[in-house]
Image (spheres, rainbow, N blue to C red):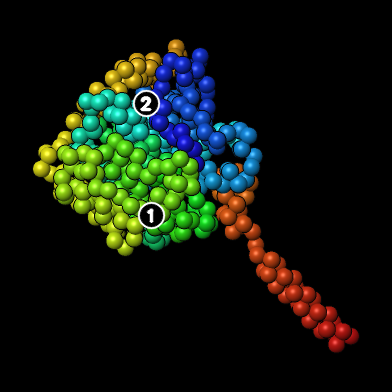
Amino acid sequence: MDRKSAGKTSPSHSTLLKSPVAFGKYRLLGRLGRGGMAEVYLARPRGQRRLVAIKCIRKKLAGERQYLDMFVREGKLAVQLNNEAIVKTHEIGHVSRRHFICMEYISGVDLNLILKRCRASRRQHLPVPHALHIAMRACEGLHYAHELNDSRGKSLKVVNRDVSPSNVRLSYDGDVKLLDFGIAKAKSGLSSEIGVVKGKISHMSPEQVRGLPVDRRSDIFATGIVLHEMLTLEKLFRGDSEFQIMDAVRRAEVKPPSMINHRVSAKVDELVLRALHKDPAERYQTADEMADALREVLTPYNFSRAELRDLVRDLCREEWKQEQRVVEICLAGEPGDQPDGGLDEDYGEFLEILEDDDPLMTTAEREARVTPRWMHLLLFFSVLLLLSAVALVVYTRG
């Protein structure tokens, strides 16, 4: 949905507002980013020493039902994704009819910046175990989403469709989190039409770029692209135009990453090439299966999260120091803004009050509440038949 999701941009003095702005039970402290559909703000719940990201639909789109429906559907899906490898969504709601999604704020940078820093330094490489760990955590988050069920226990058939370096968040503490399920496809009203291409072309699967139906194996292919790029520090599918990139993705002709990075083992080559097979039936069939394969080749390295933490802090040292200063300022509060005794985790529940006039109700839900026309006709003819019978009885007795 929005290319600048929560936490993709670190806060800085230039993004902070001159003074906090009240927004329901939150105080908006600064803007993290702006996309075509939404704006993302750094915020602090009142009475809490914790930062969150507030994603608001842009005012110019708030009155258009199509975009509002998309925004609400994103929030309804995201709030169900409760996994350590996915950015947590606390609640969705609206303040003075301004719709928002409240998410955890991840202090860190996206994988795209890490890859850029590595490319900029001739001596710096993204170590193989770091790449394997990041891909493994992404697979764990994807598998959780792929296995998500609705309240009746039926699979939602979630497909992310937008796995890319810019949507993988690396925290300064060594966490790996997936961002932005804004264009995710799900069985319950979230799927897009066949032939509509959504996502970043260079990180799509062959079937996705052709506009065909996609399933979890499409996300596995995209994860394979990210892993290949981490191991080689080169774009996998390139071209001078979108058409050329799409053609390269369709052909899916992939060279083993060891041809560029000699530190990559034959087992890792085999793993990457299987994830990037053109035929979905030849790939890993689940993200969990791919995660197991990654875990197996990662085990000999005795890798720890602290190693990823140290790498991120080293490559982004200035950003880390600056963010520490800004976060300290944001958490300091204002005169008179004393904690109210509420729990740090007290963000409230998923705000879903589907009244007839509820602006959070999607078009599909609204239409589902409307009595079908045939029922009105049936009621009309039933009443007409009853009145005719009564009239006949009265006439006969008369």
Residue 198's label in the rendered image is none
- Mark 2, other Cα within 10 Å: few <14 / some 14–19 / many ≥20: some
**Residue 118: in sight, yes or no?**
yes
Residue 361: give x, y in percent of width and height.
57, 48
Q: Amino acid at mark 1?
A: Arg
* Residue in the image at 35% along x and 48% along y: 222
Query: To which quarter of the image does residue 289 belong?
Result: bottom left
Query: To which quarter of the image does residue 208 belong?
Result: bottom left
- Image vertical order of residue 72 relative to residue 280, above or below: above
Residue 293: give x, y in percent of width and height.
20, 51
Query: To which quarter of the image does residue 347 belong?
Result: top left
* Residue in the image at 69% along x and 66% along y: 373
Earlier residue among tags 1 and 2: 2
Q: Secondary structure at mark 2?
A: loop
Q: Which residue is mark 2?
A: 50
**Residue sitting nearer the eye, 268 or 301:** 268
**Residue sitting farthest toward the bottom:** 396
Q: Is residue 276 left or right of residue 99?
A: left
Residue 251's label in the rendered image is 1
- Image vertical order of residue 220 relative to residue 327, above or below: below
Camera-side mark, 1 or 2:
1
- Image vertical order of residue 289 relative to residue 340, above or below: below
Q: Is residue 116 left or right of residue 243?
A: left
Q: Secondary structure at mark 1?
A: helix
**Residue sitting farthest toward the right:** 398
**Residue sitting nearer the eye, 58 or 4:** 4
Q: Amino acid at mark 2?
A: Arg
